[in-house]
Image (cartoon, rainbow, N blue to C red):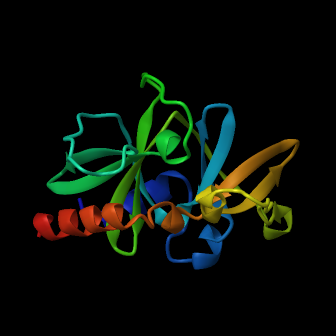
């Protein structure tokens, strides 16, 4: 099944009309890493899979855990916990891989657990706070979504993978699969 077919099937299972861009505009897949809840726009979501064997590739950043072969496609896998410089933890039965498509390239992200798909109206999204002396990790936070009393950290998933080594690996994986 092609990535676009997978996305359509996932959208249908969540009641999302893929043909209407407006229906996807404020919808986010929410997941947990540690105690925090994060969200990524569903327009990038292809599928959610269980954790599986990853082939390690040498000389990549430590947060790139390797690649998986998913139905003949080689997909680089990033552990978001490590990407965000959080403490590493053992994977469990709730740990999963969120497969995304960014600039026509498939990339997977390991998350502690997937929560839900929710709609967060633009009026409930605040810009990410900026602090002096802060590292580059704020560059991939697109905003903070207010959902009742909870806060969802909304990620600009394209910026999460701006690392040149990751982009080159993803592009090479796509080329190898053709």
Compared across the picture, whether 36 is left or right of 146 comes to left
Please tell me which residue lies in front, 38 or 123. Answer: 38
| Image quarter hosting the N terminus | bottom left
Q: Nearer the viewer, residue 147 or 55?
A: 55
Residue at image point 18% right, 51% down = 71
Asked whether, in this view, residue 132 is left or right of residue 103, the answer is right
In this view, 74 is above or below 113: below
Q: Position of residue 86 (x, y in %)?
A: 56, 37
In the depicted view, which residue is nearer to us: 85 or 113?
A: 85
* Whether residue 85 is situated above or below residue 113 in the rendered picture: below
Q: Quadrant of residue 155?
A: bottom right
Give the residue at x 56% y 57%: 15
The location of residue 37, given as percent across then percent down, is: 67, 42
- Most extreme residue toward the front is 133
Say above or below: 169 vs 20.
above
Place residue 87 in its image quadrant.
Answer: top right
Percent coordinates x, y for residue 34 in the rendering: 61, 31
Q: Nearer the viewer, residue 16 or 170?
A: 170
Q: Residue at x 79, y 66 (%)?
A: 127
**Is residue 34 rendered to the left or right of residue 18?**
right
Residue at left 32%, top 62%?
Answer: 165
Quarter placement of the C terminus: bottom left
153 versus 18 height, above or below: above
The mark tally for this picture is: 0
Q: Is residue 165 left or right of residue 26?
A: left
């Amino acid at each position: 099944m092609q990535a676009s077919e997978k996305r359509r099937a996932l959208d249908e299972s969540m009641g999302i009309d893929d043909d209407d861009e407006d229906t996807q505009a404020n919808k986010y897949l929410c997941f947990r890493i540690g105690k925090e809840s994060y969200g990524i726009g569903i327009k990038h979501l292809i599928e959610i899979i269980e954790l599986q064997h990853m082939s390690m590739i040498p000389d990549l950043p430590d947060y790139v855990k390797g690649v998986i072969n998913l139905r003949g496609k080689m997909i680089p896998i990033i552990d978001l916990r490590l990407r965000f410089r959080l403490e590493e933890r053992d994977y469990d039965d709730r740990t999963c891989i969120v497969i995304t498509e960014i600039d026509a390239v498939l990339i997977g992200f390991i998350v502690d657990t997937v929560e839900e798909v929710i709609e967060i109206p633009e009026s409930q999204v605040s810009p990410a706070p900026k602090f002096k002396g802060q590292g580059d990790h704020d560059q991939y936070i697109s905003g903070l979504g207010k959902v009742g009393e909870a806060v969802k950290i909304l990620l600009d998933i394209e910026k999460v993978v701006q690392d040149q080594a990751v982009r080159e690996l993803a592009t090479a994986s796509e080329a190898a699969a053709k």
